[in-house]
Amino acid sequence: MFERTLFVGQSGKEYKYWIYALDDKFGSTPANYVFVREVEPGWFEPIYIGQTKDIHREIFENLPRWQCILKNRPTRLCVHRSRNNELERLAEVNDLIQRYRPDCNG
């Protein structure tokens, strides 16, 4: 059974994300994602927030901030599948970054 979590942006808008293991595989779809560390059961601290036009083809190891992500010891990857509209994905990413200020988005 898959779990979900809710992230709330600076704007107050709510975004529902599915919670996955770090090594899970994904189908071909645009998505936003959040590397998180579970600090207590059900409580996730965002480490890095990003977006991609195809999460199936995304190579996270090529992210410019990959070493920062690893250093912060992520425990899960949260994913919100979205539309093809990159501007909408970027607006969501920016809304969440403004609220949570993850270490690796700085």
Image (tube, rainbow, N blue to C red):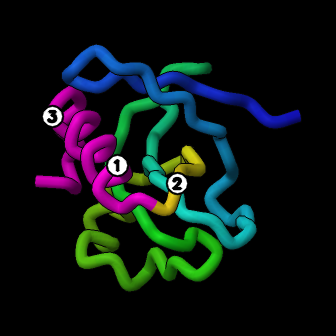
- In the image, is residue 104 part of the stretch drawn in magenta? yes
Using the image, determine if residue 99 lies above or below residue 60: above
Q: CA distance from mark 3 to mark 2?
A: 22 Å
In the picture as drawn, the residue positioned furthest to the left comes out as 106
Between marks 2 and 1, how big is the CA–CA gap?
8 Å
Q: Which residue is label 2 attached to?
A: 83
Q: Measuring from the top left, give residue 52's x and y in whole percent.
A: 44, 67
Is the residue under label 1 in contact with that under label 2 (CB below 8 Å)?
yes
Task: Name which residue lies at 51% across and 33% down.
Answer: 38
Dot 3 alpha-carbon crowd within 10 angstroms: few under 14, some 14 to 19, many 20 or more:
few
Q: Position of residue 57 (x, y in %)?
A: 59, 82
Q: Nearer the viewer, mark 3 or mark 1?
A: 1
| Amino acid on which disc 1 is placed | Glu
Q: Nearer the viewer, mark 3 or mark 2?
A: 2
Mark 2 or mark 3, which is nearer the start of the sequence? 2
Numbered disc 2: secondary structure: loop
Q: Secondary structure at mark 3?
A: helix
Are the residues at dot 3 and dot 2 in contact (C-beta closer than 8 Å)? no
Task: Note whether residue 4 is visible.
Answer: yes
The boundaries of the magenta stretch are 85-106
Type of the residue with mark 3: Gln
Counting residues from the start of the chain, the first of labels 3 and 1 encountered is 1
Label 2 crowd bin: few (<14), some (14–19), many (20+), radius 10 Å? some
Residue under label 3, please give it: 98
Q: Helix, strand or loop at disc 1?
A: helix
Percent position of residue 83, x then y: 52, 54
Residue 18 position, x and y percent, is 65, 39
